[in-house]
Image (cartoon, helix red, strand yellow):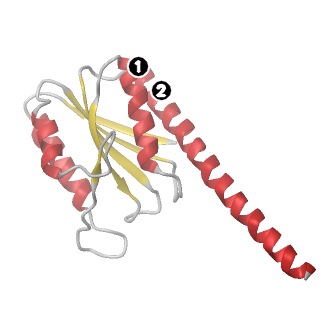
Amino acid sequence: MILKAKYAHGPAAAKRTKAGIRYVTHRPGRETDKPVIRELFGPQTDTVSKESAYALVDASADRYLYRLMISPGGETNADLRDVARDTMEYLAGRLDAEIQWIGIEHRDHSANDHVHIIAAVDRRLCVRDLQGLRETAARSYEQQLDVVTDQGSEVAHSQDRQIQQEMDR
């Protein structure tokens, strides 16, 4: 599991973070040079407006604004939104604080599917915090793969049974 983290704090933090939001929502796709508009998501919703994301940034002037990127390191069928949600839930528990954040999935501009997260945190994250984020993301991703594999196995077994039934006729 790959985890990248950058943060901004202080007077320029909001401007940098908003630029990051614009970049990840409008980055060109693999198939085109034209910007592809992607939907932001949040802890409990699959759609967050860019204006709401900017409002989160503006309301977090005295906090550390983290730009996180989580990637399994290739293409995947796993639900990276759920991986992001599990990872941020871990961070909220570790810090014993409510974490305001938004995310965006990127599956269309590189061979490495990933999710970007913008999070407002009350303090600078330490190495253990970041290690915990990576470990939680990896566990969540593995659970996602188990679900996808189990569903695929069930479909394959069902298809095998159908073929066997047809051969027995």
Q: Which residue is identified by label 2?
A: 132
| Rendered position, 51 above or below 57 | below
Q: Residues within 10 Å of mark 1 (few under 14, many from 20)?
A: few
- Horizontally, residue 12 falls left or right of residue 47, namely left
Q: Secondary structure at mark 2?
A: helix
Could you say which quadrant of the image residue 36 lies in? bottom left
Q: What x and y, as percent, mark residue 157?
A: 77, 63
Instruction: Name which residue type carries label 2.
Output: Gly
Q: Residue at x 87, y 74 (%)?
A: 164
Q: What x and y, as percent, mark residue 93?
A: 40, 21
Q: Nearer the viewer, residue 1 or 56?
A: 56
- Horizontally, residue 33 falls left or right of residue 95, namely left
Q: Residue at x 26, y 74 (%)?
A: 33
| Rendered position, 151 above or below 6 | below
Q: What x and y, as percent, mark residue 26?
A: 22, 61
Report if the CB atoms under discs 1 and 2 are less than 8 Å apart.
yes
Question: Which numbered circle lies on residue 158?
Answer: none
Q: Residues within 10 Å of mark 2 (few under 14, many from 20)?
A: some
Screen quadrant of the C terminus = bottom right
- Rounded to the nearest angstrom, the CA distance separating label 1 from label 2 is 9 Å
Q: Earlier in the sequence, mark 1 or mark 2?
A: 1
Q: Residue at x 65, y 56 (%)?
A: 151
Q: Secondary structure at mark 1?
A: helix
Q: Residue at x 71, y 59 (%)?
A: 154
- Horizontally, residue 97 falls left or right of residue 83, namely left
- Horizontally, residue 55 falls left or right of residue 103, namely left
Q: Nearer the viewer, residue 165 or 89?
A: 165
Q: Which residue is identified by label 1?
A: 94
